[in-house]
Amino acid sequence: MSQKLSLDVSPNLSPIHSSPESWARQRTAVVTGASSGIGAAVARGLAQDGWRLVLNGRDTTRLDGVATDTFAAAFPADLTAAGADRRLADFALDQVGRVDVLVAGAGIGWAGQFSDMPESAIDEVIHVDLLSTVRLVRHLLPHMVGAGSGRVVLIGSVAGALGVRGEAVYSAAKAALAVFADALRYELHGTGVGVTLVIPGVVETPFFDRRGTPYTRRRPKAVPPERVADAVRRAIRRGTHEVYVPGWLCLPARVHGMAPALYRRLAARFG
């Protein structure tokens, strides 16, 4: 089981090293879950592309390291803490003036039988993977709509598209995030603000260690977080609504949607 971190820290208030004139020409992004894994890889990739960044994560030391590497402003905080989502939004707008993209990469998991899952773990997975993301979007979205442009990038999971044995609550949270992305996309039509859902499979990150159970299956093979980060960057450039990483994962998802009974028989047989 992942251990919840209760952080009571002040954000790194060091300004981003750019002049106001260069700020006006740069795109800006907020990335959550940026202390490691997919979020850190996204931050480094966007920095290479010339983005100004505000980074959030719960591991202060790791986050400061990523922020230093990417010349970003760091806001270390547990987004499940009361008001942390609003403080992050306010901090980002104070630091960079505008937010063009939000990449919501914060997430945790828990593996095991649902009947054995502690209530505290249920609450934490739902809060981190769904509720804190929805709340942060709520705080930043009016700014994007007012500017007439922007993109919300949500990091989902194939577990949310298919359901994964032993990860019932995580699958439920990611499925809810996927439906949220669809509904929000329809609502934002014509505003200039887009929504992208990135659906990774197994990724080589500390996620599995933190959930309490390592990934031991031979297939599907885990992909590096940089591969997901590259997909995020392409999706932002192209305005893609949905992307699977790796791309072949869309096939079982389509079978699940078009022939659910067949998919369930195959899943029961092959896991």
Image (cartoon, rainbow, N blue to C red):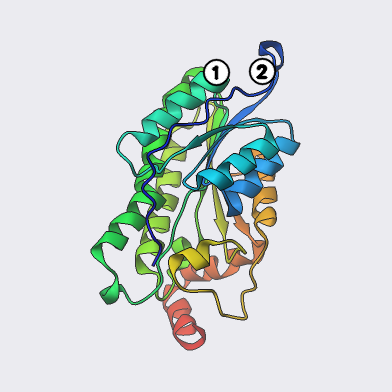
Indicate whether 107 appears above or below 193.
Answer: below
The one of 232 and 81 positioned closer to us in this rendering: 81
**Dot 2, how many residues are within 10 Å of its Cα: few (below 14), some (14-19), or many (20+)?**
some
Contact between labelled residues 1 and 2, with CB atoms less than 8 Å apart: yes
Residue 22 is left or right of residue 95, and the answer is right
Instruction: Return the residue at label 2.
Output: 23
> Which residue is at 56% across, 29% downward?
150
Q: How many marks?
A: 2
**First in residue order: circle 2 vs circle 1:** 2
Q: Position of residue 123 (x, y in %)?
A: 28, 56
- Callout 1: helix, strand or loop? loop
Question: Residue 97 got which mark?
Answer: 1
The one of 224 and 9 positioned closer to us in this rendering: 9
> Which residue is at 65% across, 62% downward?
246
Is residue 87 among what the camera can see?
yes
> Which residue is at 54% across, 74% downward?
215
- Callout 2: helix, strand or loop? helix
Indicate whether 269 appears above or below 246.
Answer: below
Residue 192 is left or right of residue 183, and the answer is right
Q: Position of residue 83 (x, y in %)?
A: 32, 33
Q: Position of residue 245 (x, y in %)?
A: 63, 59
Indicate whether 48 appears above or below 100.
Answer: below
Residue 204 is left or right of residue 186, and the answer is right
The quarter of the picture where the N terminus appears is bottom left
Disc 1 marks which amino acid? Gly
Q: CA distance from mark 2 to mark 1?
A: 9 Å
> Which residue is at 44% across, 66% downward?
211
Is residue 158 among what the camera can see?
no
Disc 2 marks which amino acid? Trp
**Dot 1, how many residues are within 10 Å of its Cα: few (below 14), some (14-19), or many (20+)?**
few
Name the residue at the bottom extreme: 269
